[in-house]
Amino acid sequence: MNIRNEDALDPNTKALILYIGKLFLLFAAAFLAGHFTARLQEHFTQKAALETIAQSHIAEASEGNWGLSFQQDGQPPVANASAEELKKYNAYYADITQDKVLYLTFDAGFENGNTPAILDALKKHSAPATFFVVGTYITSNQDLIKRMVQEGHTVGNHTYHHPDMSQIASKEAFEKELKDVEDAYQEVTGELMVKFYRPPQGKYSESNLQMAKDLGYQTFFWSLAYVDWYQDQQPSKEEAFEKLLGRIHPGAVVLLHSTSSTNAQILDELLTKWEEMGYTFRSLDQIGT
């Protein structure tokens, strides 16, 4: 008898063979489905990993913008570079201390009549400040520059043309932006400029920080600021106090704009309130001491 001849098999045997065949097909289908699912899952996992890498590169690219995250009122914010990372470039954003000291800084890109009131308030409170100015500010406001120096303030370097310095790769071009400000300052005051540098808009790169260090500069970011630079959208006194009183913290480097009419109006009262909270004012050359 030839057992491969289906006509020679009894019905029970034929049924068993068909049943085994169906089982084999089911197992094969399940195996293929599982393999396909695994490959599909692997594909999406790899895609997600690539997307994560791409996002991390985007995040790295955006680290050239100084940024802060305020977690708790009265405590230093979390910055996108630590004090330890910055220190190797002689760069700072706050004084890491528990002492109630703060450092007043003003960015000055142009003059619109608010700086005299700011200087008056600083003088009344014997509060030293650093004014980070652009080159044209020096040449256009010589009397104010001289007054800042005479009243014990520091004039810092905010570059001559206020460009995005993180896009300047040439050390020669980087140096010229700072050197031209130094020359203008010396011509007006007869003195050498203190080598304090603040990157315009807080845009920076590690190579920029190294260039500044190589030129003998200290770079200063900030740990407290608020939106005070829009001329036609000045914050109210209440809005200013909410940010500047609530977020003040030991060792704060405060950034204000000298063009702000709100700052000019509230500074005397603001300094009084900070004093009532137990704060004293230091100049930037004392940071970390």
Image (cartoon, helix red, strand yellow):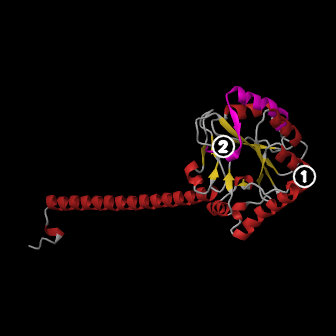
In the rendered image, residue 66, in percent from the top left (x then y), is placed at 66, 51
* Residue that numbered label 2 is attached to: 223
The residue nearer to you, when weighing 259 against 193, is 193
Amino acid type of the residue that numbered disc 2 sits on in the rendered structure: Ser
Q: Image quarter for residue 180?
A: bottom right
Q: Residue at x 72, y 29 (%)?
A: 275
In the rendered image, residue 56, in percent from the top left (x then y), is placed at 55, 57
Magenta stretch, overall SS: helix
Amino acid type of the residue that numbered disc 1 sits on in the rendered structure: Gln
163 to 171, vertically: above or below: above
The crowd level at tag 2 (other Cα within 10 Å; few <14, some 14-19, many 20+) is many
Labelled disc at residue 55: none
The N terminus, quarter of image: bottom left
In the rendered image, residue 161, in percent from the top left (x then y), is placed at 81, 60
Q: Residue furthest bottom?
A: 2
Q: Residue at x 68, y 31 (%)?
A: 279
Q: CA distance from mark 2 to mark 1?
A: 30 Å
The crowd level at tag 1 (other Cα within 10 Å; few <14, some 14-19, many 20+) is some
Disc 1 is placed on an element classified as helix
* Residue that numbered label 1 is attached to: 142
Q: Residue at x 63, y 63 (%)?
A: 207
| Residue 24 visible in image | yes
Q: Residue at x 36, y 59 (%)?
A: 33
* In the image, residue 274 lies in the stretch drawn in magenta: yes
In the image, taking residue 27 as reference, residue 105 lies left or right, namely right
234 to 108, vertically: above or below: above
Q: Residue furthest left?
A: 1
In the image, taking residue 14 as reference, residue 278 lies left or right, namely right
- Indicate which disc, 2 or 1, sits on the residue closer to the N terminus: 1
Q: Image quarter for residue 64?
A: bottom right
Range shown magenta: 263-289
The C terminus, quarter of image: top right
